[in-house]
Image: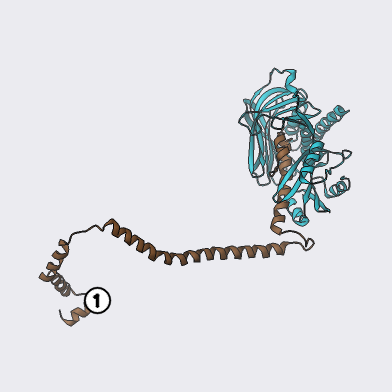
Chain colours: A cyan, B brown
Amino acid sequence: MIRIERLGGLVAAILGLSALAMAQPGPRGRPGGPGPGGPGPELLRKMLQSQPTLRFSGTRVVEFRNGPDRVRNTEIVLKDGERQRIEFSPDSPNAGQIIVENGRERRQYDPQKNEIQVLRPRREEMIGRLGMLARQIREGGLRFRIDAGGEIAGVATKQMILTDPEGNVVHRMWIDPATGMLLKREILDPVGTRIGFFEFTKVNFNPRFSPDDFRILRRGAKVVTLDDLVGRIAKKLGFSPLRIPASEPYELEDVRPVDLGPRKGMMQMYSGAKGRFSFYQVTGEIDQRRLERLAGGPRFDVYSWRSGERTLILVGDVGRSELERLSKTIR
Amino acid sequence: MNSEFEEKLKREKGLSRDEQIRLEMALDSREHAEIRSWVGELTDEDPSLAWRSALNERLHAVRTPVRQPKMRWRWASVMGLGLASALTLTVYLVGLKPTANPGTTSSGEKASVEANLLAAHQDGLSMLDLGTGSPAERATGLGQQNGSFSEVDLGTL
């Protein structure tokens, strides 16, 4: 059943791209259109269709922002269709951690805590995100164009550039048109600053894998789910282990404390077909107007309410009425 | 020297050619030559270390009371500017504070809280898009977690 649902996501994303290809046959740079209808969606479709069978081993550099800092890891990636293993080079901040994904779940081993966290598979969400990008292109919220991408890790690529209607670049993707492999990706903020990227530096399309590559067997390690983490972090901060019920069409993706100086805060991140949002518990009050004004830049909606000495807040791109509805489900 | 010439010298007025010659001759006179030779014969004596030390102490003693008021004045200026800036900022922020939330903490703290909440959401998204979640960060992430894309966008498919 789960497998059918996951395949459904992939099929939906591909169908969305097919619809995009048919809907956008206009010439490149056409006013109001996303650019060439053929090559772009075709490239994305190729990328998505190749995923269940794509096999490679490689090394990639991943950089993301963490507060004021940029964190850069070098990852060793093994991929066999839906199965994937990620390790980190010894000089990486995440060195020692091992991530294994099998299409149903993602397990992250943290040697410092001797703990295995069981999370949702990222691949599934990534397909969903690409489907959302396709939808945004179809609805005119994003445009794209295709350029030569040059060689990445020795592989000739095509570069897909996604821009907002004003022409600001928001994403760049370098794709191998032969295999559909995504070799490089950049994500930019509203003023064009690169806030995250990955780039493969080595890739081998004929790797040899062992079945053990895609398992984590560690006796004595504690297995922790995200629900466990909600309870653990809430207890540590003196909050109630509130969350969005699992019956809602959103999956819990992440939970963590939030640094708010003298005040305590905790966040949970959820994703679903409508978008993604964060649920916060914060001690004391917040300024709802200020939060709404600040959220207006990245186009997030905000809904907050008081609960005793705390403020509960929902921030996301699923619409304010949906956030308000979700606020009534939290328990 | 006649009185007119003397008056010109005292007032440093311009001299005629004749008067310039008269002045040079007077300076080259025998009396002046003797005085120059006496001065030239004086030996240059290096002041002793003890004398220099004493002089430095005196100078330091004299200088300190002069500098103190200057420093005080500078610190007072800086503090005054700081107070004025803080007052201006407070007035400005109080003006911005919505009346709907009268019982809240200072506006400055709130602003950072709200900004941090949004930054955490954006960073959480970006880390998901990158596909490189870290258990350590998840467990200990008391620092800001920034990112408007998530691990997924930067994850491998």
Give x and y (percent) for residue A169: 68, 42
The relative height of residue A21 versus residue A308 in the rendered view (above or below) is above
Specify the farthest residue to the left: B30
Left or right of residue A328, residue B28 in this image = left
Chain of the residue that carries numbered disc 1 in the rendered image:
B
Q: Nearer the viewer, residue B92 or B40?
A: B40
Q: Nearer the viewer, residue A327 or A10?
A: A327
Whether residue A189 appears in this view of the structure is yes
Q: Nearer the viewer, residue A27 or B10?
A: B10
Give x and y (percent) for residue B101: 78, 60
Q: Quadrant of the N terminus of chain A?
A: top right
- Residue drawn at x 14%, y 69% as measured from the top left: B32
Q: Which residue is mark 1?
A: B13
Left or right of residue A303, residue A178 in this image = left
How dense is the environment of label 1, judged by Cα within 10 Å: few (below 14), some, or many (20 and up)?
few
Q: Quadrant of the C terminus of chain A?
A: top right
Total of numbered circles in the picture?
1
Dividing the picture into quadrants, the one containing residue A59 is top right
Question: For the residue marked with disc 1, what is the amino acid?
Answer: Lys
- Residue drawn at x 63%, y 40% as measured from the top left: A70
Dividing the picture into quadrants, the one containing residue A114 is top right
**Kind of element beneath mark 1:** loop
Give x and y (percent) for residue B9: 22, 76
Dividing the picture into quadrants, the one containing residue A52 is top right
